[in-house]
Structures are given as C-alpha cells and as structure tokens.
Image: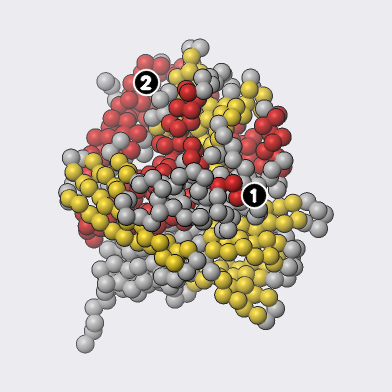
Amino acid sequence: MSEAWELIGKATEFVAEEMGVALKRSAISPNIRERMDHSCAIVTLDGSIVAQAEHIPVHLGSFKVGVRNLLEWMARESVVLRPDEMMVVNDPYISGTHLNDIMVLAPVIAGGRTIAHVVNKAHHVDVGGPVPGSLNPGARSLYAEGLVIPPTKLVRRSELDQDFLSLLLANVRDPSTAYGDLRAQIAANRRGAERIQRLVDHFGWTAVEDGWRESIQHARRLTAHDLRNLQEGDLRARDVIELEGRLLPVHVALTIGRGRIVADFVGTHPQVEAPLNAVFGVTYSATAFAVRCVLSSPIATNDGFYDCIEVRAPAGSLVNPIRPAPVAAGNVETTQRIADVVLRALGGAAGWSIPANSAGTMMNVMMGGYRRDGSPWAYYETIGGGSGGRWDGDGVSAVQTHMTNTMNTPVEVAEREYPLVFTRYGIRAGSRGRGLFRGGDGIVRGFRVTERTTVSVISDRFLEGPAGVHGGEPGAPGRATLIRGSRRTPMPSKFSVQLLSGEEFVLETPGGGGFRRQPRHR
C-alpha cells in the first residue's frame, strides 16, 4: 500500500494526544489539571490498541488488558453503545489498574456504524472508602479502598446518567471535583471520536482501516527485530517490596527468542491482605514498559508492540491476585518493583545499557478533611526521586521515574486550594548512590496542615535503598518524619495518621543507585 498508512498512524497518535490536552484543560482537580494523571488511546472494535498518547506508563499497558475485558463483558451482557453513549468502569479486576483510575470508553461512529472506540483513564483524587484519597494503607480487601464501579452506561442518548452520577457523588468526599473531572473525561472522548470521524472523512474508512493495520504490523516487525538483537536465552532476577517490616520477593524469569519475550513471575510472593497486590493489567503494563526501554527503534506503542510480549503471572500471587484482594498500592508501588526486576533481568541481555535502580517508589501522599467552612477536601500527589546512574552519565535528580510520568504539583496551586503550607521543597543532597556514575538525588518535601487532616502515605525503599549495578553503591533509602512540636517521630513506608492544625510531616525520597564501582586512585 502507499505510504499514507504512516500519515494515518501518526494522525491517530495525535488524536490521542489531543484527547489528553482536552482532558487536562477541562479537568477540575490539580491531580489531572496540573499533574496530568490521565491517559488516552484509540482502539479497534476488538480492543486492539491503534494509538496511545505519551501519558502514564502504568495506564498505557493496562489498556491492552482493561479494554478487552470491558468489551468482552459488553458482548456477554449484550450491551451495545449507540452514538454518543459511553461506558464507565473502575473495577480493577476488569479495568486493569486500581479504583482511583476511572476508565471511560466511547464508540466512534462513521457511515452509521461503529468503527472503533476511544478510551481514557483518569486518576480521581477520591473514590470513597475509609481514608481521604482512597489509597488506604490499611486495606484488607478491595471493599476497603472505595466505591467499586462495575461496567455501567455513563452517558445515555447524549445525557449523563443521573442515577449513576448520584451514586458516585454520594460516595466521594469532594463531589464537585469528581463531577468536573468526569465531565472532562466525557469531553475528551467526544473530541477523540470527532477527530477520528474527520480522519475517516478525509481518507475514507478503507484507507484508515488499512493504515491502522499496517501501523500495528510495522510496530510488530520493529519490536521483533529489536528483540532479536538482544542475547537470547533465559534470564532471572529478584527484588523485594516492603510490608510491615518484611521483604516480599518478586521473581521474574525472562525467555527471549524468535522476536518475542516471555516474562514468567513464578516464585513471586503470594497475594497479601494489604493493598500491595498488582492486578494482571498492572503487571503486564510494568513488564511492557521495561521491555520498551531496551528497544532501540522508534516503535509506536500499539498492539503490534504488545503482541511480542507475553506475561505469565501465577493466580493468587502478588502480581495477579484473586478478587477481592486489595490492589490500590499495587498500581503505584508494586508496579515500580515489577519494572525494576524486569529491567534487572534484561541486564543479562542488554548488558551495560541497563541503568542502576531508580528511586523505586512513587511516594504517594493522600490528605483530606474539612475546611473551616465545613466543605470537604481531598488531595493526592506523588513525589519524584533520583534516577539510577547510567553507563554514560549520572542519574537525574528530583524526577519521576519508571511507571509514573506525572508532573509536579506547584506549591502555589496546592496552598491556594487546600489548607496546607509547604515548609520545605528541594533536592535531598547526598542521597545519590556513589559510583563511577552516580545516581540522582531524591527530594525533600514538607507539609504543615492548617486544619485537622488525615494523612496517608504509601511508599517503599525505606528498608533497602535502590541498588547500584556493576559495583555501584545503593541510593539512600526513603524516610518519613512526623513533627509535633519538638517531637520528631520516624514513620514507616506505609501509614495513616491524624494531624492537628500546625503539625507537620516531611518526606524524603530515595536517591538512585550508582553505576559501576569507582576505580581506586593510588
């Protein structure tokens, strides 16, 4: 076929990017509006991913799992979407991440028939449950993490379903923000559907369909080519994630050959009664991210790329739990460890191109309560750390790494909207791992609350700092300190606590590991 397929493929990627811009600009919460904690994609009728925007890594790979799960559910239940109708779901065992990520899917109609779907995920700051922010460190089941939304029609005949909306808003702490963010998701899908319709009007449906097919095949060819350049064989690695002073193992065995890669997580710790379990969509996403990092070609992240990656995760394990295991932190912390362990294993095939461990935590902070006027509030952010040293240079300081790709929440925005005062924000000097090439430094971020506030933190790498490679030294472990007057109390990596007005807590994120032992000078 002509080279029009490449133009069509790139135009479709741009549609996903434009959807993301529309979502960001019309959202209410700083988490989406400032931090851009959302992702968008275009998929075929059978759920094959055609194009994705460069948004949140843990969202993107999960579309491969979540969209197909949703479409299969719709087929079983004989649910059909008419023009300008949309489905919504946040059940992690369907959508593939955690409850905070609300997924909205809409059909694309051309010539009187459905030709594709547009879909987005956005992290809602609060979806109910016992703690503000809904990422509950003490959860023992999914039902302690917030409102579970099964596949439901969100928009019917162009109108937002009021019964569903009433149910949602009655279960969240900040209804106006939830409503605004949901409307932003609807607007993003409408923009995406409109743009795909214009693409079909311009090129014709046959050319667009052929272009999508060729884009997927092209990505599959490039991925297989790059995987053949890696050393074939069986590779293994192990890492750990923390839970109440214990170190839970995450194992992976990689098999590379014939332009494919298989990741088998046999030997990983069984699922736990704590929110560290990662649903299969998260495990697949983190694995795909790590594989993508070692490929040299400019490969579109569509189904052609994903078709070359197989993930085997034992049911009932930390990386593929059985419902109703809690999963909120699996999406934000265990996902980081999966990426770490797969990258470590890939070091056996890609050699010196694999860097030392990065911070290894998203350092999730959830806060909430009531303002003086009685109105509720909820706040969420992740804090960056240091990236690992590399074969050709030091790691980067104070940056989001691996499975998070969010932006910084500006201090001015957070202080304007919430009863918070930031007491410190800067580079955590001296936290980088030493080596010929050093890791990047982490971040110090301190908060003082001006109203009674519930604070929850879910993080990791407090017991062991991010590892160096080739003899490089580890980065400094993370730390959390609660300050009440003159009393300073060290806190674990996962906790919830009540703070009174004037009380403060300080978070220090890990530095990246060092790369290669420094030569000794005589």
Q: Is residue 195 above or below residue 448?
A: above
In space, the residues marked 1 and 2 are separated at their CA atoms by 43 Å
Residue positioned 56% across, 18% down in the render: 82
Residue 469 appears at what percent x and percent y? 29, 67
Residue 174 appears at what percent x and percent y? 71, 47
Which residue lies most toward the top here?
112
Numbered mark located on residue 129 in the image: 1
Left/right of residue 70 with respect to residue 135 in the rendered view: left
Tell me the residue that label 2 is attached to: 209
- Foreground label between 1 and 2: 1
Numbered mark located on residue 54 in the image: none
Which residue lies most toward the bottom here?
522
Residue positioned 31% across, 60% down in the render: 238
Q: Secondary structure at mark 2?
A: helix
Left/right of residue 368 with respect to residue 114 in the rendered view: right
Residue 198 appears at what percent x and percent y? 49, 21
**Quarter where residue 472 is shown:** bottom left
Residue 202 appears at what percent x and percent y? 44, 18
Residue positioned 42% across, 29% down in the render: 47
Residue type at mark 1? Gly
Left/right of residue 27 with respect to residue 450 in the rendered view: left
Residue positioned 64% across, 62% down in the render: 455
Residue type at mark 2? Glu
Q: In this orientation, does residue 365 appear? A: no
Q: In this orientation, does residue 267 appear? A: yes
Q: Secondary structure at mark 1?
A: loop
108 or 20: which is nearer to us? 108
54 or 467: which is nearer to us? 467
Left/right of residue 84 with respect to residue 209 in the rendered view: right
Assign the N terminus to one quadrant of the image: top left
237 or 42: which is nearer to us? 237
